[in-house]
Image (spheres, grey):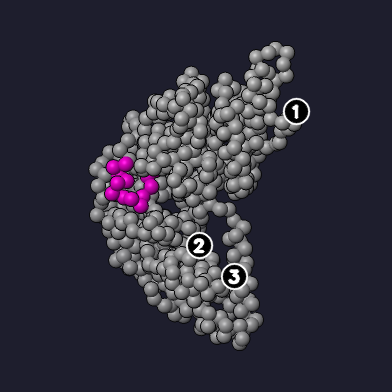
Amino acid sequence: MSTGNNSHLNLLRDFFGLDPERDGDLVGTMQAIELRGGEWLFQQGDPGDSLYFLARGRLEAWRQDEDRPATLLNEISAGEAVGEVGLLTNMPRSAGVRARRDSLLFKIDRETLDNLARTHPDLVMQVSASVAQRLASHIARRHTRPAPRTLALVALEQDGDLVAWSHRLAEDLCADGEGLVISPETLTAMDAPDSDSALRGSPSAPLKQWLCEQEEQVQRLVFLVLPGQSEWHEFARRQADQVVYLAPADTEPALRPIESSQAGAEPGTSEVLLALWHRDGATEISGTARWLEPRPAARALHVRQGIDNDHQRLVRILTGRAVGLVLSGGAVRGLAHLGVIRAMEELNIPIDWVGGTSMGAVMAACAAMGWDSTEAIAQARKAFVDGRPLSDYTLPLLSLMRGKRMERLIRQFFPVRIEDMPIPFFAISANLNTGDTNVHETGPVWRALCASVSLPGLFPPSVHERELTIDGAVVNNLPVDVMQERLVGQVIAVSLGAQRQRQVDFDQAPSPWAVLGGMLWPFAKRKKVPGVASMMLKAIELGTRKRVQELGERADLLLRPPIQRFNMIDVNQYDDLVQTGHESSLEPLRQWVSQSSK
């Protein structure tokens, strides 16, 4: 950590609208703080005695709870304030903040702020107005993570095909003048000041300022690192909001020496991406877990040579344009999700990341397998209509159904690991002991799905990490918040909850004999009451309705297919459910595409 000097006056002027000559007293009180990528600004529990304004770079806020891994709360972009809550409340820091990349901040402590309020109230008001405007603009934005402004693409092998793809990826990330590829060669060609300092891994102040000026002119900078450029890698890594390692999937998964600085998994380790490149002709994706084992802070993505959708998906993920699809639970009504997937396919809306809860997780897995809508609909028909997993009744000691048929079918249709799916995927389940939310992003797909669909009372609990788990709908039936923590720019959510109230034609709940009589006798009045299974499902839906509504409002587009007329456990409604999901979502999706393109 080091303090700046007069070279920061221009930044202060641009950041606060201050004149260094006229407002010299105020400028002199603002201490410039420079952080190298990975350094901590303050730790959780430190005194909340100062306020910081981020002028350049990016920060991360991390929270550490007892007996749990550190949690990334949010990222702080240039123009935002950090530490204002602690300063105003005089409370210890509720989270730690560290630099994701080399960053410049301005610091004001409590004593300085009090003195300025007495001696320069007009200037303090000016600064306060500037901060308020910036805070308002950030509060108004979407809940998704900010797109990286600087990327480091690091090729791990001296492989001709990989290097060629690395160059193509860098160029596509900068297409149409949106970005600028930075390499040792381009620094020299562009007459960057003191470019040799970058090759030594320690950029000088003039070079940092030059890079900041380039970043202001384009949407992103892409630092390209080729094998053998270890010092350049150290420089690029510390300038990057996002580090992306590129490796051929058919090579040894052991850590390369160049990765050592990013391999740790201590609290507060930033996520890196590992883009595995599969050569043309590779029949299937496998072995990803072996790559992730020595890289606990990494997330794997896949690009298959010859499949342009994979390459374009990675480009969208890295440029903040990825579309995340979130599918809610709803028992058999969840089959309507397949119709939504078909509508998205017809309108050329990509699915770049997909996740869901309960039956929504199963339908999400169909998309994550890379199946087109025709194959997904056909496979789901085989599983849920022909396989009839909801007719597996048993002695109701643990549940109404054994769940063995459901498990067998899920194993049969999803015989892969989550890490090996071509499209990033997650499923939600609930820990029966603690009520915590499990987000399944690794391991066998069948285990994640069995955990996510374990409706309490209907199916027996599942086991995840030696603890009992139940249906994720109990804690999060529309995990928009989970999706927005991933590298997506926009989120489409599909909710299958009830939208209207229904009244009954009796004053008191009928007895079981009255219900049975209405079913058996041709002239008896039929009592329209839900069965035991439907009642359980409905109770879960009611218990999470408010939370689902709140999460739905966070989505960029919320679809609500009109599926209330359908029974929650009757698979014979298959075709009508798919058709309803398709027809009801086409127009909203078409309008969304039209608005997004403006």
Q: Secondary structure at mark 1?
A: loop
Q: Is 295 within the magenta? A: yes
Look at the image and give the residue range highlighted in magenta.
289-301
Image coordinates for residue 53, horizontal then vertical, percent: 51, 71
Hey, what amino acid is under mark 1?
Answer: Asp
Residue occupying image coordinates x 39% and y 35%: 447
Q: Nearer the viewer, mark 1 or mark 2?
A: 1
Instruction: From the viewer's perspective, tell me whether residue 61 is left or right of residue 520.
Output: left
Placement of the N terminus among the 4 image quadrants: bottom left
Residue occupying image coordinates x 33% and y 37%: 278
Q: Which residue is mark 3?
A: 131
Q: Is residue 122 above or below residue 441?
A: below
Q: Is residue 241 above or below residue 51?
A: above
Question: Which of the 4 image quadrants contains residue 494?
Answer: top right
| Mark with earlier residue (1, 2) | 2
Of 98 and 25, the residue lying toward us:
98
| Mark identifier at residue 77 | 2
Image coordinates for residue 417, horizontal then vertical, percent: 36, 36
Q: Is 119 within the magenta? A: no
Note whether residue 368 is visible. Answer: no
Instruction: From the viewer's perspective, tell me whether residue 469 is left or right of residue 21.
Output: left
| Mark identifier at residue 405 | none
Q: Which residue is mark 1?
A: 505
Hey, what amino acid is under mark 3?
Answer: Val
| Mark with earlier residue (1, 3) | 3
Residue occupying image coordinates x 61% and y 86%: 118
Q: Nearer the viewer, mark 1 or mark 3?
A: 1
Of 540 and 479, the residue lying toward us:
540
Of 282 and 561, the residue lying toward us:
561
